[in-house]
Image (cartoon, rainbow, N blue to C red):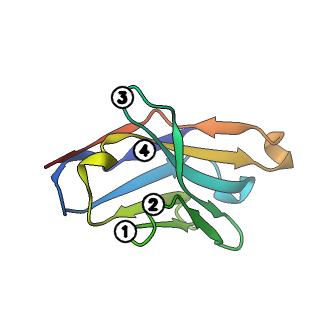
Amino acid sequence: VQLVESGGGLVQAGGSLRLSCAASVNTFSFNTMAWYRQAPGKQRELVADITVSGGTTNYADSVKGRFTISRDNGKNTMYLQMNSLKPEDTAVYYCNAKGRAVLAFRYYWGQGTQVTVSS
């Protein structure tokens, strides 16, 4: 199982980016998918997650109203639309997925994509 992130980059404060996470397997193999981020010197934190089947979402307070998580099960891809970006959103963003029984309930991680927001 591989998760491959894309879409990171450098953007000015107030700008937008859309991250993508492409899975090498059918996303219905997962219970949930999520985006985490880790800024220099800080712990990795949950940004948002989504249930694969029902599409129920959950967001960190710091991104509510600015970020939107979604998935396209037909494309085996998850997205994170990030609007009104702030310098404090600068971090490496990681895709995460929790497998169903067919994947032994394992957790999987992508390699990360850098997001840098300049002030």
The Cα–Cα distance between marks 2 and 4, rounded to whole angstroms, is 9 Å
Residue type at mark 4 is Glu
Name the front one of labels 2 and 3: 3
Q: Quadrant of residue 65?
A: bottom left
Sequence-wise, the earlier of marks 1 and 3 is 3
Residue name at image x 71 percent, y 60 percent: 28
Where residue 83 is drawn, which disc sits there? Answer: none
Which residue bears the numbered disc 4? Answer: 5
Pick whichever, 115 or 29, lies toward us: 115
The Cα–Cα distance between marks 2 and 3, rounded to whole angstroms, is 23 Å
Sequence-wise, the earlier of marks 1 and 2 is 1
Residue type at mark 2 is Tyr
Which residue bears the numbered disc 1? Answer: 66
Q: Quadrant of residue 32?
A: bottom right
**Residue 76 seen:** yes
Where residue 79 is drawn, which disc sits there? Answer: 2
Residue type at mark 1 is Arg
* Element class at badge 3: loop
